[in-house]
Amino acid sequence: MRMMATLRRLAQIAVVLVGSTFLLAMLLQLLPVGLEELFVVSFDEASRQQQLERLRLDRNPVFGYLGWLWDFVRGDFGPIIYPGAGEEPVSGRIAAALPVSLRLVIYVQILALLISVPLGILTAYRAGRKSEKAISYGLFTASAVPNFVFALLLAAFFGVTLGWLPPLGYVPPSENFVEHIRTMVLPVVALAIPTIATYTRLLRTDVIATLREDYVTMAVSKGLSNVRILFTHVLRPSSVTLFTSAALNMGALIGGTLVIEQIFTIPGMGTEIALAIFGRQYFALQSYIALIAVGYVLFNALVDVLIGFVDPRARERRNA
């Protein structure tokens, strides 16, 4: 069973990788401007032809894509070409930017879960009361506001007006951990606010449904405290949707970092994607998207395992 599950997961990674990158490659063919005009920047015909060959734009699009895919699977992510100044391997940019974005996303998930879990339980337990309705309306409003709006407001108020936190820049944790945390607070909060709203509402719905189960009624009749019932008997079976949403939200968070990293000048994958787009770096853009697609599937695989521990019924259904 485990072997079949592993093979099925590897097949999913392959399908997502090929599907997302092939779709990008084919969509680029539909642009009104030819790819050689869009991505090739040169000062003479010789360097132009060299770039065409290096980017595989001198051949059939499908064969060019297959050549890029073979290189990607072997660990060659392609070059970043500087007209008249040589080239730089994309792998070096990824090695520097990927840990930065992963830290940002992990911090966001930790903060969102730490706040949304107790808040979701509280709003479910107090469902229908005025305090719960006020919180629910506030969460609904927060989920409807784009995260870049929160980013601009937080940077302007806490960074510029009050001067409590740096509004721009990034400090690696190896250089100064305290300053690293200070530079990450505003972008993490900006990304976490809509996420907290979504997670809280999902958990609230599942907790309300779980509170109606017979075993919860039996626990109440035994005289167990409300705190013990909520966190011991209710939270675990109510967390499946939350974990699933957290995995699916990884892709949205990585997409959200593209704007947030630009606002706070954080040198992560979002910044690299923006640079690849504006710098017309075809290979780099495809490699970045492929890595995000693979990471998305891997995060979902990890959450499948976690759900199996949280809810054994889910593991049995998956292995059936």
Image: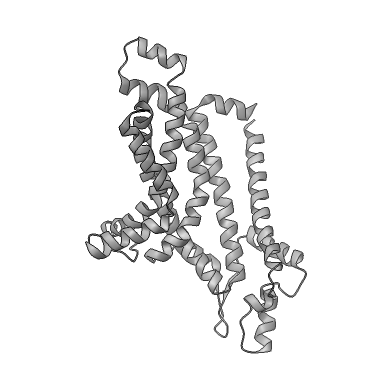
- At x 40%, y 46%, the residue is 141
Q: Is residue 170 left or right of residue 303?
A: left
Q: Nearer the viewer, residue 308 or 167?
A: 167
User: In the image, is 303 to the left or to the right of 176?
Assistant: right
The structure residue drawn at horizontal position 27% and vertical position 60%, both measured from the top left corner, is 157
279 relative to 205, above or below? below
Quarter of the figure with residue 180? bottom left
The spot of residue 124 in percent (x, y) is 38, 29
Q: Nearer the viewer, residue 175 or 191?
A: 191
Does residue 18 appear in the picture of this structure?
Answer: yes
Rendered location of residue 117, percent (x, y): 38, 35
Is 112 situated above or below 276? above
Residue at coordinates 45% horizontally, 62% vertically from top-left?
A: 259
Where is residue 60 drawn, in percent x and y?
A: 78, 69
Single out the residue that lies furthest toward the front. Answer: 130
In front: 300, or 257? Answer: 257
- 171 relative position to 307: left or right: left
Quadrant of the snapshot with the N terminus = top right
The scheme the figure's colours follow is one colour
